[in-house]
Image (tube, rainbow, N blue to C red):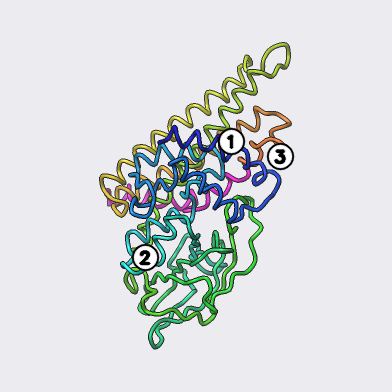
């Protein structure tokens, strides 16, 4: 399946990625739908979607191979319907949704018929990495709830069919709600001008203003949102790592091919020791990152995404891989020389787009803090 995915990305995705990554064409739903239909025809659509909904239903260990292949292009995971935030939302819905919620939201999302968004992060002084700082609140109303608050970095909100919103509820807890995008109390504001711009629907500001949702819009249990959101964290972090590893591998191969064919100071650039050191360090980072991805995938499959072992392993993997990918791409730009900082070459955009990976799904500093707390807990 990884080989088939690699062939699909090379044949169908590479020819259009420059329009998105370099030329600035928005990654709109028309292109997404076209690429996903081509993925269906190639038999590589929906690696993480349940088989019942037209997907491949792969376990995490298999996903490690397939998503690295899809990740060779920044828009490859989108083409196979395994990109953020839909990937984590599929996991969350599969874990928490009622039968009716699965019919309305999970099934069309897994089939690629719609997109979703995740409304959690808030402008300061609201919640960022610390979810207990939630300022968006939901109050009980006759027959349902009223949600009020402002979110930002709501990936995919422009054009999504629904949002998964976390809001504070009475008693000091939080609750997760399914909010249809056509709800009159939900307003999608501007797309935030972020470094990365390959995600469909951008990263948006979203306002909830007396946004009424019925009781059956609650996902999971009232007041248990902090615990239940964990169902998407470990899978989402590891899938981010798989896809970005694919970008690093491709860039590494591109740089190696370039320096073998480029001469300077009387010899191929590849013959110079400093260039070889960059190549060696890239190979080391990629090999170590891949080993962590595969070992964490095994932990998730064997122990479950909500286990302490999975949370610990995914935090380690996401921290290391995000920084290793950044190091690889930075060295690749250096090996390209002047052209490395020119957007005529894809490697410049790879580097810029990758910067957010060290923040999204948990900044490295916060993950290091949580890793250390788990290690030290056993010694207290």
* Residue 348 position within the rendered picture, expressed as x and y whole percent measured from the top left: 66, 38
Question: How many dots with numbers?
Answer: 3
**Stretch in magenta:** 352-380
Q: Nearer the viewer, mark 3 or mark 1?
A: 3
Mark 3 Cα within 10 Å, few/some/many (few <14, many 20+)?
A: some
Asked if residue 157 lies left or right of residue 241, the reply is right
* Residue 329 position within the rendered picture, expressed as x and y whole percent measured from the top left: 59, 35
In the figure, 40 relative to 215: above or below? above
In the figure, 224 relative to 233: above or below? below
Identify residue for label 1.
Answer: 329
Q: Residue 356 colored magenta?
A: yes
* Residue 262 position within the rendered picture, expressed as x and y whole percent measured from the top left: 69, 19
Identify residue for label 2.
Answer: 103
The answer to whether the residues at label 1 and label 2 have Cβ atoms under 8 Å apart is no
Mark 2 Cα within 10 Å, few/some/many (few <14, many 20+)?
A: few
Q: Quadrant of the N terminus?
A: top left
Identify residue for label 3.
Answer: 343
Q: Give how far apart the Cα atoms at labels 2 and 3 are.
A: 43 Å
Which residue is painted at 38% across and 48% down in the image? Answer: 372
Q: Earlier in the sequence, mark 1 or mark 2?
A: 2
Q: Earlier in the sequence, mark 2 or mark 3?
A: 2
Nearest the viewer among 267 and 187 is 187
Asked if residue 228 lies left or right of residue 14, the reply is left
Q: Secondary structure at mark 3?
A: loop
Residue 256, by quadrant, is top right
């Amino acid at each position: 399946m990884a080989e088939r995915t690699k062939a699909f990305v090379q044949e169908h995705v590479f020819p259009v990625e420059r329009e998105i990554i370099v030329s600035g064409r928005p990654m709109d739903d028309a292109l997404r739908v076209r690429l996903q239909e081509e993925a269906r025809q190639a038999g590589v659509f929906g690696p993480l979607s349940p088989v019942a909904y037209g997907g491949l239903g792969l376990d995490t260990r298999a996903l490690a191979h397939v998503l690295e292949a899809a990740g060779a292009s920044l828009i490859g995971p989108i083409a196979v319907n395994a990109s953020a935030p839909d990937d984590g939302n599929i996991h969350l819905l599969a874990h928490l949704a009622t039968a009716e919620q699965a019919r309305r939201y999970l099934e069309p999302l897994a089939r690629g018929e719609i997109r979703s968004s995740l409304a959690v992060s808030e402008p300061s002084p609201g919640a960022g990495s610390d979810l207990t700082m939630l300022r968006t609140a939901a109050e009980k109303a006759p027959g349902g709830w009223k949600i009020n608050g402002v979110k930002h970095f709501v990936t995919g909100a422009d054009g999504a069919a629904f949002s998964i919103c976390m809001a504070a509820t009475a008693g000091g807890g939080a609750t997760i709600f399914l909010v249809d995008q056509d709800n009159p109390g939900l307003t999608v504001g501007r797309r935030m001008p972020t470094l990365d711009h390959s995600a469909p629907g951008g990263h948006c500001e979203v306002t909830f203003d007396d946004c009424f949702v019925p009781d059956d819009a609650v996902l999971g249990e009232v007041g248990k949102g902090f615990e239940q959101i964990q169902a998407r964290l470990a899978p989402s972090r590891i899938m981010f790592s798989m896809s970005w590893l694919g970008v690093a591998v491709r860039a590494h191969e591109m740089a190696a091919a370039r320096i073998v064919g480029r001469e300077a100071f009387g010899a191929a650039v590849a013959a110079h020791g400093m260039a070889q050191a960059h190549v060696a360090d890239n190979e080391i980072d990629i090999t170590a990152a891949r080993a962590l991805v595969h070992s964490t995938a095994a932990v998730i499959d064997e122990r479950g995404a909500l286990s302490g072992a999975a949370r610990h392993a995914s935090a380690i993997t996401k921290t290391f891989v995000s920084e290793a990918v950044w190091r690889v791409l930075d060295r690749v730009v250096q090996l390209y020389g002047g052209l490395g900082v020119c957007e005529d070459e894809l490697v410049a955009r790879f580097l810029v787009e990758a910067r957010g990976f060290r923040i999204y799904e948990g900044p490295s500093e916060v993950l290091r803090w949580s890793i250390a707390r788990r290690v030290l807990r056993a010694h207290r």
